[in-house]
Image (cartoon, rainbow, N blue to C red):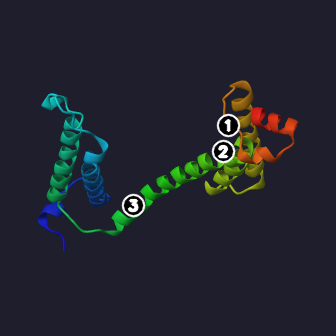
Amino acid sequence: MTTERERRFVGPRRGQLIFALGFLAVSALLLSQITGQTTWVDKTAFFAQPRFWPAIGLGGMVLLGALHLRKMPWRRFTAQDRDELMKWARVIEFAGWFMAYVLLVPVLGYLPATLIFVPLLTRRMGYRGPRMFWLSIAFALVVVVVFKTFLSVKIPGGMIYEYLPGGLRGFFILYL
């Protein structure tokens, strides 16, 4: 049963409890790590200490996060909260795709990793037809050629290139 305070709240309700809990947890975690990440320097003025202003900022984040959580008109998870959390998780999924790509480029090389990930991401975004598959491969090839040849972006060659014969290995490292 909803309270009068919950009924009178005019803002969007979905995700606020999750955000407040997450903000408070991350702020408290960062504040707990401050002694290992900053120092207290002898013979330095109090306000000039390297730890002082980060501690003020993180302490404020913890205090205001706790006040926000305390003053919320409701403290129950609903289906709307779960749906909002799933939307946030989808964003994190694409960060995971990017991190996997970044980790595989030094192993496979720029061209093979790009030729693998662009069609996979095209499929993940819902384009499943053969036309889009071939367009994604063409796009990946154009991106590699533009970045490596025309823009001269220095991307290290993949470890897999070490197994190629001498002249071919040099070509792959420089251009692919």
CA separation in Å, label 1 and label 2: 7 Å
CA separation in Å, label 2 and label 3: 33 Å
Residue 82, percent from left and from top: 37, 66
What residue sits 73% from the left and 50% below the top?
A: 132
In the image: residue 117, left or right of residue 172: left
Tell me, yes or no, whether the two marked residues, 1 and 2, touch with CB atoms within 8 Å: yes
In the image: residue 100, left or right of residue 58: right
* For marks 1 and 2 on the same chain, the one whose residue lies earlier in the sequence: 2
Is residue 35 shown above or below 153?
A: below
CA separation in Å, label 1 and label 3: 37 Å
In the image: residue 91, left or right of residue 97: left
Residue 104, percent from left and from top: 65, 49
Residue annotated with mark 3: 85
Q: Which mark is residue 156?
A: 1
Quadrant containing the N terminus in the rendered view: bottom left
What residue sits 66% from the left and 51% below the top?
A: 122
Element assignment for label 1? loop
User: Badge 2, how many Cα within 10 Å: few under 14, some, many 20+?
Assistant: some
Is residue 165 shown above or below 14?
A: above
Element assignment for label 3? helix
Q: Which mark is residue 35?
A: none
Element assignment for label 2? helix
* For marks 1 and 3 on the same chain, the one whose residue lies earlier in the sequence: 3
**Front one among 33 and 135:** 33
User: Badge 1, how many Cα within 10 Å: few under 14, some, many 20+?
Assistant: some
Pair 1/3: label in front? 1
Quadrant containing the C terminus in the rendered view: top right
The three-letter amino acid code for the residue at tag 1 is: Pro
Tell me, yes or no, whether the two marked residues, 2 and 3, touch with CB atoms within 8 Å: no
Residue annotated with mark 2: 106
Residue 100, percent from left and from top: 59, 52
Tell me, yes or no, whether the two marked residues, 1 and 3, touch with CB atoms within 8 Å: no
